[in-house]
Amino acid sequence: MGISHRIKMPKFKSVLVTGGAGYIGSHCVVDLLNAGYDVIAIDNFANAVCDDEGSPALRRAEQITGKKIAFYKADLLDKPQINDIFDKHDVDCVIHFAALKAVGESMQQPLLYYQNNLLGMLNLLEVMRSHNCYQMVFSSSCTVYGEPEKLPITEAHPTGSITNVYGRTKYFIEEMLKDLSAADEKWNIISLRYFNPVGAHPSGLIGEDPTKEFSNLMPYMSQVALGKKPVLTIFGNDYNTPDGTGIRDYIHVMDLASGHVAALKVLSDAHGRLKVYNLGTGRGVSVKELVDVFQRVTNTNIPIKYVERRLGDITAMWADATLAKEELGWTAQHTIEEMCTDFWRWQTMNPDGYAKKQKTTFIAVNGKS
Ligand code: NAD
Ligand code: WQD
């Protein structure tokens, strides 16, 4: 970052969160409200529960924080609608979570993914520019790295050799953001590459409740623990890892949320054009290890069956999160045990997700309730 780019930015007050009713968005909104930001949230409910009054996840975020959110049911593909929202609010910064994210679906419906994720982003950037708003935090993914050449992965690792359409949308957007920030120094963007987000808010009030099919390990495993699915299939036990199962960097969703608040503080202090940070714990955990911890802390029994490797899966991946520590002052705080306990609290308090009223008690964690 050159000195000439160090234009003093005003401190942010209002943050527009796209995809705010989704899993990571709703948790981040809680941290933003707690940090004193005014939140304007939008979502089209492509993958979030909607009821007569809007987003139950965001109402619960209001309940947790005691603060109000300005929510709009809106689609990023509807540019006039997004424009209207920016006309109504003085937006200082955007956190852009809204995207479709199912890897399998993206392979079957590439146009849907390119349209939603790329066009949605283009519309958003154009509306932001026309409203003189040049600050953005973008939800990127460790998927942009493809098969790691070296572990742990730093931000300098090459990107782009990705085997699925979803991942390519993240890569293409990062490339687009590079071009944009190179062309116009007013842009001030942070791209956060998340590793594997899991867990839920410790209150048990908000958590992960996708409306589309999902196949991620933690939600699937907890469906098995709840007895809603008969068995957890582990995709491969012949990887070149200590126990033969795949290794990932699981990160508590509340650590991700605090990473966004840290990113906003840096964005509002310095003009950085485009910066990229890994958000991970720096620790690799195998599938087998995660299943063992989950069973132990939740006092459940998860039947498992080993099957063939899943096509496109990577052997092992974990982050070097040093840059986020040095420049954002952020490190992940939560343990694997907390990720499992908090996810289970959410699941057992809300066995049907947001669709039904939450229970007031949850199934014992380690024998305590
Ligand atoms: P999510 O599906 O729970 O949240 C995304 C939200 O965006 C959903 O509520 C969906 O309804 C909304 N949305 C999608 N398209 C939209 C559109 N055109 N207009 C308005 N709203 C729209 O997913 P999440 O896990 O919370 O992920 C948030 C972001 O983080 C996504 O960009 C995702 O790609 C990225 N990410 C997620 C993970 C993960 O494993 N969960 C990992 C890395 C990166
Ligand atoms: C984790 C591990 C599986 C389910 C995905 C996206 C990636 C990013 C994060 C958004 C792997 C194993 C899983 C199961 C299993 N998302 N597994 N049985 O594949 O690391 O990444 O989410 O950007 O783009 O691809 O996450 O939770 O699906 O899998 O054995 O039923 O669990 O093989 O080793 P993944 P995951």
Image: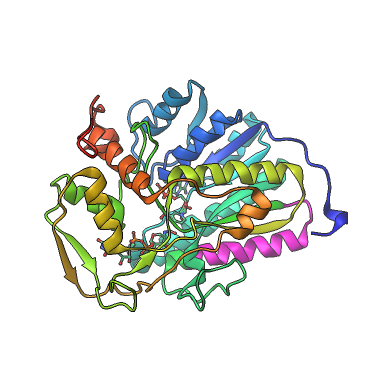
Q: Where is residue 247, by image quadrant?
A: bottom left
Q: Position of residue 265 (x, y in %)?
A: 67, 41
Q: Is residue 57 left or right of residue 257?
A: left
Q: Name the residue rendered at 50%, 39% in the picture.
A: 28
Relative image position of residue 91 (x, y in whole percent) = 66, 35
Magenta residues span: 168-187
Image side of residue 221 versus residue 80, left or right: left
- On the question of residue 19 being in view, the answer is no
User: Which image quarter: residue 303?
Assistant: bottom left
At x 41% / y 48%, what residue is drawn?
Answer: 335
Ligand 2's quadrant: bottom left
Quadrant position of the N terminus in the picture = bottom right
**Residue 193 % position (x, y):** 53, 58
Q: Which corner quadrant holds the C terminus?
A: top left
Give the vertical position of 137 relative to 349 (above or below).
below
Prevailing SS of the magenta stretch: helix
Q: Name the foreground residue: 165 vs 7.
A: 7
Seen from the viewer's position, the closer of residues 219 and 125 is: 219
Q: How many marks?
A: 0
Rendered location of residue 304, percent (x, y): 16, 61
Say above or below: 65 vs 240.
above
**Residue for point 18% across, 48% down:** 225
The structure's colour scheme is rainbow
Specify whether residue 37 is painted magenta. Answer: no
The reply to whether residue 108 is in sight is yes
Give the residue at x 30% y 46%.
211
